Amino acid sequence: QLQLAESGGGLAQPGGSLTLACTALGGVFNIYSIAWYRSVPGKQRELVAWVNTGGVPKYADSVKGRFTISRNSAEKTVYLQMNNLEPDDSGVYYCNADATGLGPGHRGTWGQGTRVVVSS
């Protein structure tokens, strides 16, 4: 059974960088599209970035040009490189794995979340 382990959250200053990692434990990694979602109090969990099984990425408009999602099949890990961070990037970031091939959606397997705080 697939499980997801996230790491890399923490505190960063505005303009700084963080790299999140989502590692798949069990399952067949290459059949899953992987996404990162962000949750903040009072708002619906929103898609930040998504990468399909072929490595093609999709980004929320708010992070385009600043965030990069990539996948490493040998490591069974998807990375989210976050540069030029802004306070609005703060939240709990959840990794999601979906094997339906239907594109981003609130389905599949979720990780436990990792908190990102961007503050001076």
Image: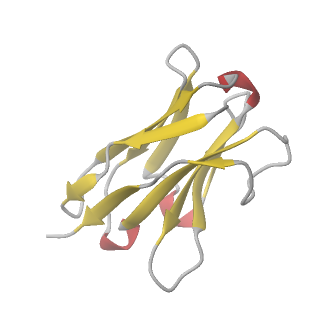
Q: Nearer the viewer, residue 80 or 6?
A: 6
Q: Quadrant of the N terminus?
A: top right
Q: Position of residue 68 (x, y in %)?
A: 48, 42
Q: Residue furthest front?
A: 1
Q: Residue furthest bottom?
A: 42
Q: Residue at x 27, y 49 (%)?
A: 17
Q: Residue at x 51, y 54 (%)?
A: 94
Q: Residue at x 58, y 70 (%)?
A: 45
Left or right of 12? Residue 25 is: right
The count of marks equals 0
Q: Position of residue 47 (x, y in %)?
A: 61, 61
Q: Is residue 100 above or below residue 10?
A: above
Left or right of 24? Residue 7 is: left
Q: Nearer the viewer, residue 26 or 53?
A: 26
Q: Is residue 93 above or below residue 21?
A: below
Q: Residue furthest top?
A: 74
